[in-house]
Amino acid sequence: TKTRDMFAGVLDLFRLRGKVDRKFLEELERRLYLADVGGTATTAIVDRVRQAFQDKEIDGNVETFVRQQLRELLTDPSEGIRYAESGPTVVMIAGVNGAGKTTSIAKLVNRLQKDGKKVLIAACDTFRAAAVEQLTVWAERLGAEIVKNPTASDAASVAHDACEKARAKEFDVVIVDTAGRLHTQVNLMRELEKIHRVVGKVIPNAPHEILLVLDATTGQNAITQAEMFCKSVKCTGIILTKLDGTAKGGAIFAIKQKLGLPVKYIGVGEKIDDLELFDPESFVQALFE
Amino acid sequence: MFDSIQRGLSDALKKLRGRGRLTADNIREGLREVRRALLEADVNFTVVTKFIQRVEERSVGQDVLARVDPSEQIVKIVFDELVALMGPVDPKISFAKDRPTILMMCGLQGAGKTTTTGKLGLTLQSQGRRPLLVAADLQRPAAVDQLKIIGQQLGLPVYSEMTDPVQVCRNAVTFAKQNNLDTIILDTAGRLQIDAALMEELQQIDRLVKPDQLFLVVDAMIGQEAANVAKTFNDTLSLNAVILTKLDGDARGGAALSIKEVTGVPIKFVGMGEKLDKLEPFEPEGMASRILGQGDLMGLVRKV
Ligand SMILES: Nc1nc2c(ncn2[C@@H]2O[C@H](COP(=O)(O)OP(=O)(O)OP(=O)(O)O)[C@@H](O)[C@H]2O)c(=O)[nH]1
Ligand SMILES: Nc1nc2c(ncn2[C@@H]2O[C@H](COP(=O)(O)OP(=O)(O)OP(=O)(O)O)[C@@H](O)[C@H]2O)c(=O)[nH]1
Ligand SMILES: [Mg+2]
Ligand SMILES: [Mg+2]
């Protein structure tokens, strides 16, 4: 049920006839910008293509080269969650408002359960209206246990209780949902650091994964988000959501360049099966579609 | 960023102070900086290209003013064009006289529709209206609870039933009439603009309930997609206005420009926080400064 979007991808660019000239390079630039790849990465790619192919015929080699350049700017295929050597693995989820944190948790729980893991969910968004109810609905659908405290206003205390429970009851994984917060909100970023600290006190080396949830529809602000969240709590990877739309999520190129932060999962819909391991090849392929 | 625009403009124009004319040549460097600033602010690429052309057309041939730096003269032209493009704005909502006025919120997932439904409810309540919030999102887990809690916080009634969105909206109108409520705000589920079935659902509500105002809610952090999203929603529904949310962050908000340029639909309000009193009228001047990057743009504009 998808209709064609307004702008074409990069692919038909290589069907053009003629030489790699200024017009071709401008068109390549335009299409990379439209995929939210942003100034720095776009300039780098266009320059490399210019140096390698200026005035040569447009053919399959140019396409292969561009794909390769884009591919090199990304990380290796994702292997998903890295588990703790012993005891529960704690996965903390963070990101700005409405990025898709809670839904991604539901999808992640589903994946991990399918891998045979016993998963506990910690409902640490004590702020947004019905955030706990939302996560509870998901937990029920998944048959997963959830730790919540509807009257608590302190997110860290819920995280603490969840970790205690996970240790006592031998859960394999604890996934901590957090409230959405803009990276510019100093107090809320401190709260995130507090959750991080508290979790680490209950379970050694926790949290083992801190996944930043980014909405693929976001433009260049995604880079600042990644920078600021990484500064506050050392993120280990990205979940890039809403890739089922026409947005391409090109900001991850700059994020990889600047921070080295890899994408671990992508969200491709609102259902629990709509979470996939990040694969750079198919990501680049999708840029071309 | 703003500084670098000025620097870029200054280098090429320094020699001109107080004499000569702006030409395509002497403004090229500066316009390149303006272009970069707009792209970095996530203004749609196609929109940027057109915009720069327009600024160039307006600038070339102008006499260099005696009292200001020529670079400031161009920044002023850019600023004026931005303001003209994003304005004019009318933050008022017009109401029907003999029946409830219906407002409908729509947009992508997570844009801020439900929160904004509450915010609008509060704003209208404080203007003496009697709003009804309607939970027409039966899709997202606990979406109805979310709106009910918001209603409770504001002391506003919330209509909900577990049927289907079209039914909910129709029955809400009857409910409003019976309970003497004069403004109905429909909160719909988030959807992708390419989801034909869900877009059709919105059209169906539009046909059957005939909202007076259709609002597209857009996250200010959105990138190049803004143009696609706004265009498709507008083509499908004929929007009345756009509400830009999450402007309390540091997103430059280039979407404001893209959306207005591509659809002609004005931006009426901006969301400035998660709290329900954080809704403000849209101001093109402030937005223009923001898109170009900070700096004392207003001071400069007054001077020129
Ligand atoms: N199309 C699509 N929608 C998604 C995806 N992931 C999440 N969503 C939707 O995005 C909206 C917001 O998702 P949430 O999971 O509530 O986001 P959140 O980050 O937890 O939001 P806050 O807790 O309010 O900050 C919901 O309507 C989800 O169904 C995705 O991969 N694709
Ligand atoms: N900082 C900030 N957060 C906002 C603003 N408006 C909404 N939010 C937050 O954004 C997130 C998503 O808001 P919702 O109102 O649930 O968005 P929605 O469009 O109804 O989401 P779906 O129904 O899932 O499509 C929540 O965490 C809100 O608190 C705003 O102006 N500023
Ligand atoms: Mg959430
Ligand atoms: Mg909603």
Image: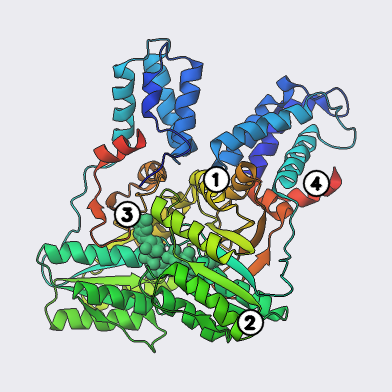
Residue behind mark 1? B231
Secondary structure of the residue carrying tag 4 is helix
Residue type of the residue flagged with mark 1: Lys
Residue B181 - label:
2
Residue type of the residue flagged with mark 3: Ile
- Image coordinates of residue A124 in percent, x first then y, are 35, 77
Specify which label sits upstream in the sequence, 4 or 1: 1
Secondary structure of the residue carrying tag 2 is loop
- Crowd rating for badge 2 (residues with CA inside 10 Å; few <14, some 14–19, many 20+): some
- Image coordinates of residue B238 in percent, x first then y, are 60, 52
Mark 1–mark 2 distance (CA, rounded to whole Å)? 33 Å
- Crowd rating for badge 1 (residues with CA inside 10 Å; few <14, some 14–19, many 20+): many
From the image, state whether disc 4 or disc 1 is nearer to you: 1
Left or right: B100 in relation to B149: right
Asked if residue A189 is positioned above or below residue A49 in the image, the reply reads below
Specify which label sits upstream in the sequence, 2 or 4: 2
Residue behind mark 4? B301
Residue type of the residue flagged with mark 2: Leu
From the image, state whether disc 1 or disc 3 is nearer to you: 1
Residue A238 - label:
3
